[in-house]
Image: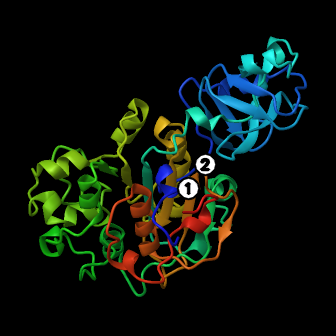
C-alpha cells in the first residue's frame, strides 16, 4: 500500500477469521424448512425482517459470509430462487445466498411496480451494507495469533477442516508470509507485532529480565488517537496484571506485559494493565454488548493455539482449528464486525525456519478465496493495523522501504 490508510480506515480488523457466524435474532435454525418463495425481477430491493445469514450457496451446508442485519436492504441478482434462497448483492460488493422467506419487498420497489409477490415471495437477496457499514467509521481490528507451524502444515491438512473448508473460501490468505529473518523463539515475534522490532529480545525469558522501557509501541499510539485496545488472553483471571504464566496461559504470548508503561515496571496491580489485559471469556460479553475496542489482540491458551498437544484431540492443529471454528463466528456475528470489520489470523513463527507461516484476512472487503503471492512479515501486519487505525508514525520494520502492507488481500486498496 503506497498511501496512508484512506480506504482501509473504513475497515475493522480482527486477526482471527472465520465463517458461519450467526447474529442476534439469527434465523439459521429456521433455514432448514424454507418453502414457497417465488421469482422476482433482477434488481428488486428487499428489506430484512430479522437478522439473516448471507451464505456462499443456497443451503445451510454452505458457509456463512456474514449476517444481514434486520432492516437492511438487499438487491436481487437472479430472478429464480434456489431451495428457498435468493442470490443477492450489497453495496459493499458482497454477493451470496439468503433465505427469501425473511424479507419484504421494499415499499419503493412496490410503488415502482418492480415486483408483484405475496408475503411468501418477498425474499431479500443481498446485504444492504449501507446501514451496516459507515465508510467514515473508525476501524475495529481483531488480531489472532496462533503458534509454531509453517503454512505447509496447515494448508490442505485434514486436521484443519475449518481453516481449509471455510476460512480460505471466504477470506484471503498469504502464501509468502514469513516471521522476521532469523527471529526465534516466540516472544520476540510477539514483541515485533507491537513495536516493529524485537527490542533486543532473543529468548522466551519472563518479564523480570525482558521488560522494556520503550514507549514507542502501538497501543500508545492507539490511546493517543483517542481509541481503545484490549488484549484478550485465555486462562487469566483479570484480577491482577498477567505478568506470569498460569494454567495454560503463557505471558510470552502477551507482548503488552513486557512494556513498563503498561505494567508500571512489573507491578501486578498496575491499573493500565488490568484495564486492558483481560480474560478471553470477556470478549464474548463485549461483542454482545457492542463494547469492543478499536484494536483487539487475541491469544488462545497453549492448548488452543496449536502449541501443545492436549486432550480431547491430542492433535495441536486439530485443536486450534476447532477453537477457531468456535470463536470466529462469534466475532463475525457481532455488530463490531458488521461495521466494516477485519479479522487477521497469523502464526508467531516458522518451525523449522522462518516459514512461510499463515496469514488469513477476513473482512467484507477481503478477496474471497484469494491466495496472495506478495512477500510479507510481521512488519506488514503492524503496518496494516497502523493504517487501518490511522495511527503513526509507522513503527520499526513497518516504516522500512519495501515493507508491504496487506492491501493486496483486499478488494479496496488505499
Q: Which residue is mark 2?
A: 364
> SS class of the residue under badge 1?
helix
How much space separates mark 2 and mark 1, taking CA atoms?
22 Å
| Residue 299 in view (yes/no) | no
Residue found at the very far bottom of the displayed protein: 182
Vertical arrangement, residue 26 with respect to residue 64, above or below: above
Q: Position of residue 403 (x, y in %)?
A: 47, 79
Q: Position of residue 214 (x, y in %)?
A: 17, 72
The C terminus - image quarter = bottom right
Judged by depth in the image, the label closer to the viewer, 2 or 1, is 2
Residue under the point 57% across and 23% down:
25
Q: Is residue 162 left or right of residue 316?
A: right
Q: Which residue is mark 1?
A: 321
Vertical arrangement, residue 190 with respect to residue 314, above or below: below
Residue found at the very far front of the displayed protein: 112
Residue under the point 60% across and 35% down:
130
Amino acid at each position: 500500500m503506497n498511501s496512508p490508510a484512506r480506504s482501509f480506515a473504513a475497515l475493522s480488523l480482527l486477526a482471527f477469521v472465520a465463517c458461519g457466524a450467526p447474529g442476534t435474532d439469527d434465523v439459521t435454525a429456521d433455514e432448514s424448512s424454507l418453502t414457497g418463495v417465488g421469482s422476482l425481477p433482477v434488481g428488486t430491493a428487499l428489506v430484512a425482517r430479522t437478522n439473516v445469514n448471507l451464505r456462499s450457496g443456497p443451503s445451510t451446508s454452505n458457509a456463512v459470509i456474514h449476517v444481514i442485519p434486520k432492516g437492511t436492504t438487499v438487491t436481487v441478482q437472479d430472478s429464480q430462487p434456489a431451495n428457498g434462497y435468493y442470490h443477492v448483492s450489497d453495496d459493499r460488493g458482497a454477493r451470496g445466498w439468503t433465505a427469501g422467506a425473511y424479507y419484504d419487498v421494499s415499499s419503493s420497489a412496490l410503488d415502482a411496480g418492480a415486483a408483484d409477490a405475496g408475503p411468501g415471495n418477498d425474499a431479500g437477496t443481498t446485504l444492504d451494507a449501507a446501514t451496516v457499514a459507515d465508510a467514515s467509521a473508525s476501524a475495529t481490528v481483531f488480531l489472532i495469533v496462533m503458534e509454531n507451524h509453517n503454512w505447509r502444515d496447515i494448508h490442505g491438512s485434514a486436521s484443519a477442516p475449518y481453516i481449509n473448508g471455510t476460512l480460505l473460501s471466504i477470506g484471503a490468505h498469504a502464501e509468502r508470509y514469513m516471521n522476521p529473518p532469523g527471529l526465534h523463539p516466540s516472544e520476540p515475534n510477539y514483541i515485533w507485532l507491537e513495536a516493529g522490532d524485537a527490542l533486543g529480545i532473543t529468548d522466551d525469558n519472563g518479564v523480570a529480565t525482558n521488560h522494556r522501557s520503550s514507549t514507542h509501541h502501538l497501543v500508545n499510539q492507539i490511546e493517543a488517537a483517542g481509541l481503545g485496545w484490549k488484549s484478550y488472553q485465555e486462562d487469566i483471571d483479570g484480577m491482577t496484571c498477567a505478568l506470569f504464566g498460569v494454567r495454560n496461559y503463557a505471558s510470552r504470548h502477551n507482548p503488552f506485559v513486557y512494556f513498563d508503561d503498561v505494567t508500571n515496571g512489573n507491578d501486578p496491580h498496575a491499573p493500565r494493565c488490568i484495564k486492558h489485559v483481560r480474560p478471553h471469556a470477556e470478549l464474548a460479553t463485549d461483542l454482545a454488548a457492542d463494547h469492543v475496542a478499536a484494536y483487539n489482540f487475541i491469544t488462545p491458551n497453549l492448548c488452543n493455539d496449536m502449541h501443545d498437544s492436549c486432550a480431547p484431540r491430542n492433535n495441536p492443529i486439530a485443536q486450534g482449528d476447532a477453537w477457531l471454528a468456535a470463536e470466529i463466528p462469534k466475532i463475525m456475528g457481532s455488530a463490531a464486525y458488521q461495521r466494516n470489520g477485519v479479522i487477521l489470523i497469523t502464526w508467531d513463527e516458522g518451525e523449522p525456519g522462518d516459514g512461510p507461516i499463515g496469514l488469513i484476512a477476513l473482512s467484507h472487503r477481503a478477496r474471497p478465496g484469494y491466495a496472495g503471492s506478495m512477500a510479507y512479515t510481521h512488519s506488514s501486519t503492524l503496518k496494516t493495523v497502523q493504517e487501518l487505525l490511522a495511527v503513526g508514525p509507522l513503527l520499526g520494520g513497518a516504516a522500512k522501504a519495501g515493507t508491504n502492507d496487506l492491501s493486496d488481500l483486499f478488494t479496496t486498496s488505499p
